[in-house]
Image: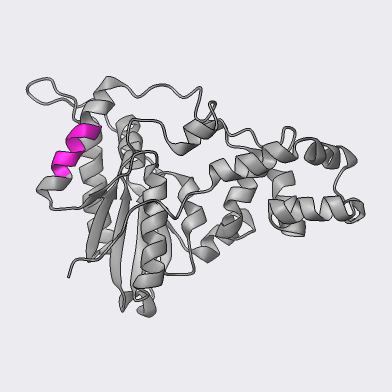
């Protein structure tokens, strides 16, 4: 069950940003293969609407926006041919429902945001960033099944409402919740992925460095940039901190990969969209 909002949160109006593709993908695999009387697949749409109604009940938002991926390659694909390589292509039955979901949101008068070359995550990041600066009295709640969005969490103003299991069991992540889970804050999520990689997106990271070592490096030395700054200055503090010699060698050998992996894992907050609340 989601946490009860604090009094401070209750005073703020709430903007919900829907990570539409992530929700539909989760619903598609969690809900039976329902079809309409005409044989058109509807399971993912059924799950999306169930999630939507649960979100309305739990969060009671004042505003809702849906963010979309587009089928053409993004700047990440253009930068790295291997990005998301190995993922199964989207099944036709899901593609049909992704397209149909636009009609659902249109009927509900929910604005949709998408930009060629950018992912839905970048829409979420850009809108959240603009709200943070332009509407400080608005709380942003990102609804997604994708844990990458945790890097966008900021204090209690930007939080993530995620599907913990299936589409019915949910959890809210504030900044403190991210720290409780990873032992570091949201600002280090992309560093974490840059070090350990992310197989789901085919982000390589540093070969030989897993979750435990990546966490240890971040907690002791900070960002990837600071890690390499210290390594080049003097690697002795790594030895004193208990970092294995082999790990140091791997870091030095794969510096370019670590830096590049972090770039791929970082959600953009400067996509070419301008968000304004309805007046």
Residue in the foreground of this view, choosing between 74 and 51: 74
Residue range in magenta is 98-104
Q: Is residue 57 above or below residue 6?
A: above
**Main secondary structure found in the magenta portion:** helix
Residue toward you, 215 or 205: 205
Query: Residue at image x 38%, y 53%?
Result: 124
Q: Is residue 155 left or right of residue 210?
A: left
Q: How many marks?
A: 0
* Quadrant for the N terminus in the image: bottom left
In the image shown, does 221 or 115 lie closer to the viewer? Answer: 115
Q: State the colouring used for the structure image.
A: one colour
Confirm whether residue 170 shows in the render: no
Q: In the figure, 216 relative to 134: above or below?
A: above
What percent of the width, then of the height, locates residue 65?
26, 54
Is residue 170 found left or right of 259 in the rendered image?
A: left
Q: Is residue 28 visible in the rendered structure shown here?
A: yes
Vertical side of 91 occupied by 167: above or below = below
- Left/right placement of residue 198 relative to residue 42 reads right
- Where residue 167 sits, quadrant-wise, is top left
Where residue 42 appears, as percent x and y from the top left, is: 18, 30
Residue 35 locus on image (x, y percent)? 16, 25
């Amino acid at each position: 069950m989601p946490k009860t909002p604090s009094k401070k949160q209750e005073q703020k109006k709430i903007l919900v940003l829907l990570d539409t593709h992530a929700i539909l993908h989760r619903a598609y695999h969690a809900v039976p293969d329902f079809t309409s009387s005409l044989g058109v697949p509807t399971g993912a749409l059924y799950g999306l609407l169930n999630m939507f109604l649960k979100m309305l009940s739990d969060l009671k938002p004042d505003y809702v926006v849906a963010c979309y991926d587009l089928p053409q390659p993004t700047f990440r694909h253009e930068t790295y041919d291997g990005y998301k390589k190995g993922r199964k292509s989207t099944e036709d039955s899901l593609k049909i429902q992704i397209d149909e979901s636009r009609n659902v949101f249109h009927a509900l008068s929910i604005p949709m945001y998408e930009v060629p070359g950018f992912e839905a995550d970048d829409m979420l990041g850009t809108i959240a960033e603009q709200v943070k600066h332009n509407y400080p009295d608005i709380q942003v709640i990102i609804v997604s099944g994708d844990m990458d969005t945790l890097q966008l969490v900021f204090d209690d103003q930007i939080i993530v409402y995620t599907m913990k299991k299936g589409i019915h069991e949910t959890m809210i992540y504030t900044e403190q919740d991210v720290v409780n889970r990873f032992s570091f804050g949201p600002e280090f999520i992309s560093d974490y992925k840059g070090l350990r990689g992310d197989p789901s997106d085919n982000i390589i990271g540093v070969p030989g460095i897993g979750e435990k070592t990546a966490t240890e490096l971040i907690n002791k030395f900070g960002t990837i940039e600071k890690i390499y700054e210290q390594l080049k200055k003097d690697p002795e503090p790594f030895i004193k901190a208990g970092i294995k010699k082999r790990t140091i060698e791997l870091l030095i050998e794969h510096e370019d990969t670590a830096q590049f992996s972090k770039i791929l894992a970082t959600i953009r907050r400067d996509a070419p969209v301008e968000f304004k609340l309805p007046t």
